[in-house]
Every structure is written in structure tokens, then in C-alpha cells.
Image (tube, grey):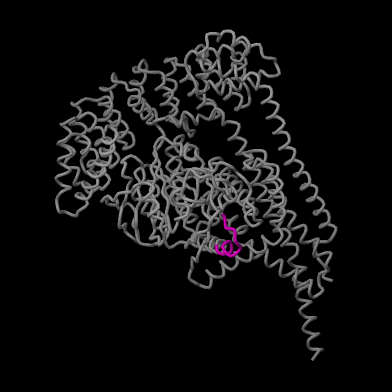
Amino acid sequence: MAPSIVGPALLWTLLWASVGVLALQLVLVVGARVARTTRQGRDARALSPLRPLLLELASGDDDASEDLAGVLAGAPPSTRMVLDEAILQLLGKIRGDSSAALVDVLHRHGRERKAIEDLASRSSVTRAHAVWTLGVMQEAESVPKVVPLLHDRSPDVALTAARALGMMGDPVAATAILTSAAPVGSRPGLPAWIAVEAVTSLGTVTAPQVRAALDHPSSDVRWAAAMVIAQVPLLACAQALRESVARETHPRLVSVMVLALGVVGSPRDTALLGSLLEETQDAQIRRAAIGALAEVGGSGALVWLQPMLSSSDVRVAERAATTLVSLSPAGHAAVAAIAQSEDSGASARLCRYAVRQHGLGRSRAVRRAG
Amino acid sequence: MSEIFEGVLESTRSVVAVTFTVLSLPILVYFVLINSAYLMLVVFSFLDFRHHLRRLPFAGREQFMGSKMSPGVTIVAAMYNEEMGIHVSAQSMLSLHYPRHEVVIVDDGSTDRGFAVLEAAFHLVRVDRPMPPDLAVREEPTEVFVPANGRTRLTVVRKANSGRADSINVGINFAREDLVVFIDADSVLDPEALLAVTKPFADDPVRMVAAGGVIRAVNGCTVRGGRVVDVRMPHGLLERIQVVEYLRAFHLGRSGWSRVGALILISGAFGIFRRDVLVEVGGLDPSSIGEDFELVLRVHRRMRKLRRPYRVQFVTEPICWTEVPSSAAVLARQRRRWHRGLWETLWAYRGMLGNPRYGRVGLVALPFYWVFELLAPIVEMGGLILVAVGWLLGVVDTGYLLLFMGVAYLFGMLVTLSAVTVEEYSFHRYGRWSDLLVTLWAALAENVGYRQFTALWRLQGWAASVAGRQQTWGVMTRTGFGNDDPDADVPSAPASRTRKQ
């Protein structure tokens, strides 16, 4: 027999250790399944008598909502946790009077006090959950306590705080939310889309803060501000936006500002937007300018867009063709004229495609109207 | 004569004995190391899952769905003879929960009725849309079709056969949105898949460049209206083992790599990339066999060379359901191709191996793939052959042989069972007790026969590449999702079709 460096004793030890761990894993797997099904069953049983009342209260069409809220508020302590979580889930989806009734139940269970205490928890999950609770409960008076969490060491807590502030609806938080999009040192700021969504939900009263954010040193903040102007929309920020478009150089920023100008601008912006169509401009900016011209330029946009049909950038030309056919009869005619030519170049093919695609959409609309 | 034979036999015995003495420890250490490494990846993935699941209630997915800020997505699928399942797949892709997405299906010169099925189902009409020349392609499109309703965001491009990678590149050229998702035409996505897989791009639009999603086996599940509505374990042992294998290697393994910031493989069955990055690196390489792996490595290399901050992430929850081979012949072809692709790509990017310039990718992930993925079949088969020969020559006694094999494979079972345990604690998609028992059984059975044959097939793929034999794709028999009625409630294996890959 070959003398082996790996002796049988070592192998037996490893074998039995492995068998032991395997057995432990089998127990863990089966135990996890048993524990989960037991917990789910227990929660379902606890919630089942209350669920009809909860749904009735959430539907908001019952005159006896005060009584229903009273019954739910008086739920035994053992079921309160499950009930509160079910209410929080519902609150994430509904608004209005019914949400107020559900929030009332949470108030009676002392959830906002617990959430405020949890804001200082060491666990990031607990902090995020607390912020989220205050947000769906629309606890506007908690805004000063939540704002500092926009700079929480955990990114999850920071973005949940921004969304919660958006739900709370106090415009005083707009500047804090927007500026939290700026990176701090090497750490990235709040995701810009979260900041935009949150500030957008605060409404038109945020115009002064958003206008000021257009001058912020951070490009992320300026980007978010331009997006908010487009989303709300904030007409009061149009002039500041024009100045920013002329000043900015980064294609990503300019294109989003051009997009916003298309929403809040006027026909007097046609020349500014037209100047962004030059071949020397970034393709991203040119495509955004085409869309913006169609929004604000009206018939005046035709002069600027028609030359784009022969652009060497196929994507720019396609955007121009599809925009022109739906812009006005004159725009459609301009594209159709090229489409009907015998030319087999990219420009003519794009025009034929745009006319065809537009026709498909129209024939469907006609069929619907019929 | 017999003395000569005895002499040769004795010499052989001596050689085998020495070899065994020298190699038994390294082989055992290798088994311990490879399984410990996998175990660590399982632990990392568990942390990742835990992080994800605990935050899910307030992650804001509903808000993202309703947000105008969600980045636009183009789903690109290459189709070759997918007549059996293309309607269901297209339906599934179009009906995903997402505010802004389009679907581009590239018919790679199919010889079946795949295109006719799509034409009839979506009332396709031909349009003369030129292809933007962002990426060079081998075969130009011959025809472009869109649905007659002018509303459904579907584009079907027809072209001569030039392979999946070239077809995907054509699809990227036709894509209008900023993010591009690659998906196999015979796969089905969960309804929330796009929402989950695009969220990292919305959260970090500058650094995120690519992400991969979870891939699971659809075999045995019920597909209705292009969606998996009932998750069950398949009936065949081969498919059951692959379910467990996908869970360990693709789900937990990649999640673990993502956690340590060194994900280098995103499956072509479900991957998402920023379109501008794809154009910048030149798209998929049609000459590569492991084109998905090659693409991700090229992205890493490009970003590192330019010193750009970037992220490649694995998203743990969205699921792409794909069909796994149900016959040994098809599985063998698949594994030969995979290992050949692995070898050729690793060799092509050998300059990144151990190179500090490429950070964890060069210092951790690539060495791991060389040592524990590429070399694993050599060590495994070498070890098996050695102990078998030693046993036949009487160098190794039966008890020791069984003990040695038992220890080596018990480690493997331990890793797989760890993966099953993590799955049970996190997503537990297979809800029935019977499925759990089948999963546990498959985790144990994988080590007897399946592992050894896959090691052999992988070696064959590698050998074919080293010998310079041309890759032949062969015929891939698949079962499809049933009939063409997307509302039909059908299990996933009622019919068969052939697919030339």
C-alpha cells in the first residue's frame, strides 16, 4: 500500500466533521421552513379578523370610520405589531381621508413616538424603517428631525429620508433634499432621481429653492433642479433656466436643461434651442433640443428642424423626422415630400419610416374614434 | 514473458504509489480550498440577500414604477428557430412592469416559422428604418417590422444568420433607450425584473455600467401569459440537479462576487448594460465563444484603463427563467462550449491576471477563475483517474479510496447544501415540502455521476480549443413553453423543438 501523507485519521476527522455540518444544515433548512410557515400562519390568524375592518377603513367610504379606527386601535397588544405593519404597507399605496383614518390608528398605537425614538437607533435598518414610518404617516412636525438623516452614514437611510420628506409635504425641506444630491468628499450624494421625486411632490411653492439650486456648485444638484423644473413644472424658473442653458457646458446637464426649457419655455426660446442643433454640438444635446423645439417652437420650429433631416447622425435625423411628422401639417408635408422621392439614402428612408410609423398610429386613432 | 509483465506492473505500481503519495495532499487541499472559496461566496451572498430583503419594504419600488425618472430600457433578444416559444417570450417581454421599455427581436436567419408566428401575433408591418451604424455588424438587416397598431413598442429585425453576438449588436444599434437588456428569446422574465435590475442605474447613473440578474430553471414550472405562475421542481434528475447547480453557481456565486466588487461574468441570458458603454467598447465580439464573459472583461479593462469610477453589480432578486437541458447529450454540448469559452476568454485576457492595475478583478476574481473554474476539471479528473488506477493496481486499498472520495465530495455537498440553506432563509421560491425534499436530494445526488461527467465534458471542450478544432454548435433540443396561446396554462415541457445555436 502507498504510504500517504494524508493519513486515515485526518480523513476520518474531516469526514465526521463534514457529516456533522451536513446534518446541521439539514436541520437548519427544515427548521427555517417550519419556522417560516408557523410564523406566517400565526400572523395570518392574528390579522384575519381585523383585515376586513382594515380594508373597510382603507376604502374610505364608510361613515363609521371613527368606530372602525377605534376597534383597530383597541386590538390586543399581541396583534398590534402585525396590524401596524399591514397599515404601513397600505399607507404606502393610498392617500386622502382613508389614509388619515389609518394614520389615526397608528397614532393611538404610539407608532410615531416609537419611530422618533428609532431615528437614533444604531441599526440602519431600524433608522430607515423609522423614517419610512414617519413619511407614510405624513408627520410634518417631524421634518426637522428627519432632515439630518439626509446625510446619514447609511445611503439607504438617506434615500428613505428624502422620500419620507417628500411624503411629509413640507416645502421647507426642498433645499435640504436638493443639496443632499451633492457628493461629500469621495462619497456620492443622494441619488438624483430620489431628490427629484421628493421635491417634485412638494409642488410649485418650491420654485425659489429650486431656482437657487440652479446656481449650486455641484452639477448633481443643478441636474436635479433642472429635472424638478421639468417635472412639476415650475414656470417661474424659466428665466433662470435660460441663463443656465447658456452657461452650462456638460452635455448631460445641458440636455436636461434643454428638456426642461421645452416644458416651461416659450416661442421666444426657439433661437436659443435652434443654436443647439449645430453639428458641433453633442448628439445628446441635439436630440434634446429637437424635442424641446417641438414643445415650444410651434410652427417656428419647422425652420430649425427641417435641416436636421439630412443630419449625418442617423439618430438625430430620425428624431427630427418623427418629431416633424407629428408637429404640424407643414412638418408632415416636409417629411412626406422627401419620403416620396426616389432617393434611397438614409435621409429619405428615415422620412419614409417616420411617415409610415405616424400613419400606423393615426390609423389606430381613427379606428378608435370610428 | 510473465516476468517482464510483472516487472512493468511493479514499476507502474511504484510510479503510481509515488505519484499518489506526492499528489494526495495537494488534491485534498485543492478540494478543501475550492469548496471553502465557494462557501465564502455563499456567505457573502447571504449578507447581500439579507441586506436586500430587510430593506425591500421601503426600497421605493412602487415609486420607481410611477416615476418619470426611470431610465428607458431596450430589451434585445436574438431569435434563431424559436417558433415554439417566441410568442410567449415576446408577450412576456412586452408586458413587464416598467414605465418605459421597448423590445427589439432580431431574427438571426431562422429557418422555422418563428417570424411568421410573430407576424401573425402582433400584426407586423414592414417599415424602411435604417440602422444607426453605432456598432459594426457582420450581417446587415434585410427587413424591419413594427406592429400595425403603431403603439406596441416592438421592433422585429430580420437578417441572414450570423450568430447570437452579431444579432445582439444589430439590436443594440436599433435600441432607442439608454439601457440595453440582453435576454435569450427562449427565456421568461419575472414581471418586476426590469424595475429591480434598472434601479441601481437610477440610483447611481454615472458609475453603474452593467448588471446581471438571477437565472433559474423554468423546467417544471407553469408558464401562463408569458409569466411563471407556479414554481415547481422539474421531474428529471438531470434538470433537478441543474436547478441546484444554478442556485449555487449562478445565483449565490455571482451575488458573492458582486458583494466583493469583482463580478466578471454576467450571463447572456439576462444582463443589462448602459448603451453608451456598449458602443464605446464595441459591443459583443461575434468571434468569441464566451461572448458574454468576454464583454464584461472588456468593460472592466476599458474602465480601469481610463481610470473611470464604475460599478458592475449583480441584482439578487429579479429572475430570468430559462430552460435547462433535459438530456445528457445537450448538457454535454453546453458544458463543452461553456468551458471552451471560459478558457479562450481567460487566455485572451491573461494580461489582466494578477495585475494590480485591474484591482480586485485582476487580483482576486481572475486568479479564482483560473485556479478554481478553469483547472477544476483537470484536478478532479486527474484525482479520479489516479485513485482508480491506484486501486486497480492495489496501491490504494478500497477503504482508503472510499474515505478519500467521501471527504472530497462531502465538502462539495456541504457547499451545495449551504446554498440551499441560504435560499430557504431568503427567497424560498420552491414553496412545497416535496420540492424542498427533492432539492435536498438533488444537492446530494449531484456529486455522484453528474459532477464527474460535467468535469469530463469541460475537459473535452478545453481540449477541443487547444487542438484548434472549430466550434460546431450542433442542434439544441428544447421543449419550449408550450403552445402559442399566451393565456394557456401550461407546464413548461409539453412539446419539443430543435434549436441550432
B434 vs B214, left or right, is right
Is the stretch drawn in magenta largely helix, strand or loop? helix
How far from the left and from the top, in percent, is residue B364? 58, 51
B358 or B58, which lies in front?
B58
Quadrant of the rendering where the N terminus of chain B is positioned: bottom right
Q: Is residue B14 above or below residue B193?
A: below
Q: Quadrant of residue B71?
A: top left
User: What is the count of numbered marks?
Assistant: 0
Q: Is residue A26 above or below residue B29?
A: above
How far from the left and from the top, in percent, is residue A191? 45, 31
Find the residue positioned furthest to the front. A370
Q: Is residue B120 above or below residue B461?
A: above
How far from the left and from the top, in percent, is residue A353? 24, 47
B260 vs A296, left or right, is right
- The answer to whether residue B282 shows anywhere in this view is no
- The answer to whether residue A2 shows anywhere in this view is yes
**Residue ID at (84%, 71%):** A1
Q: Is residue B374 above or below residue A57?
A: below
Numbered range of the magenta stretch: B324-333
How far from the left and from the top, in percent, is residue B121? 39, 48
Q: Is residue B259 magenta?
A: no
A135 vs B453, left or right, is left
B425 or A220, which lies in front?
B425
Q: Is residue B331 magenta?
A: yes
